[in-house]
Amino acid sequence: MIENFVWLVHVLAAAGVIGLVLIQHGKGADVGAAFGSGSAGSLFGSSGSANFLSRSTAILAAVFFLTSLGLSWLSSHRVHGSSVMERAGAVTSEDVPKVPTSELPPSAGSSRSQEIPVSSVPAGAALPAGPANK
């Protein structure tokens, strides 16, 4: 229950940081404001949007960092099995059906007879397709 809440806060903080970074002006945007194209003072006050957006980004980045630490701590202190196989119930050899050897094709165990030593093949010759040459 608490892990789901931390995940929700983590994802929202990540989306918030991404959004705030994308809407911030770069360092070169101040040059454009000097020639009359900047109107940042009207919406966020006389200091512009830099202080508001940078503080918001810093707060969300701190929340993201803390939720990352919290999620790593929660994942390391789980009570149930430590691996996926332990939680799902591992398949044992008794669960796997056994195939009688009478149902196997006759060439299943004789792949050795189809191998050709590389030293006996002339240079540039094509080898026949077989299990040893794939």
Image: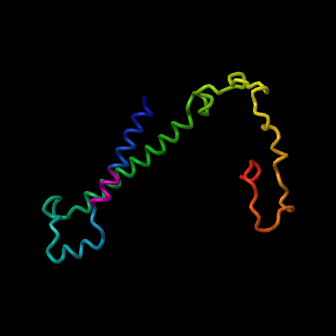
At which x and y percent is residue 40?
17, 64
Side of 26 relative to 116 (left or right): left
Segment colored magenta: 16-23
Q: Quadrant of the rendered structure where residue 78 is? A: top right
At which x and y percent is residue 127?
76, 58
- Compared with 96, 118 (above or below) is below
Residue 60 covered by magenta stretch = no
Q: Residue at x 30, y 68 (%)?
A: 26
Q: Residue at x 42, y 33 (%)?
A: 4
- Compared with 73, 95 (above or below) is above
Q: Nearer the viewer, residue 103 or 5?
A: 103
Q: Nearer the viewer, residue 12 or 120?
A: 120
Q: Residue at x 75, y 53 (%)?
A: 133
At which x and y percent is residue 37?
15, 72
- Compared with 122, 14 (above or below) is above
Q: Main secondary structure of the magenta part?
A: helix
Q: Quadrant of the N terminus?
A: top left
Coloring basis for residues: rainbow
Extreme-top residue of the structure = 94
Q: Quadrant of the rendered structure where residue 42 is? A: bottom left
Side of 78 relative to 66 (left or right): right
At which x and y percent is residue 45?
16, 60
Q: Nearer the viewer, residue 73 or 82?
A: 82
Q: Residue at x 30, y 59 (%)?
A: 22
Q: Quadrant of the rendered structure where residue 122 is? A: bottom right
Side of 13 relative to 33 (left or right): right
**How many numbered callouts?**
0
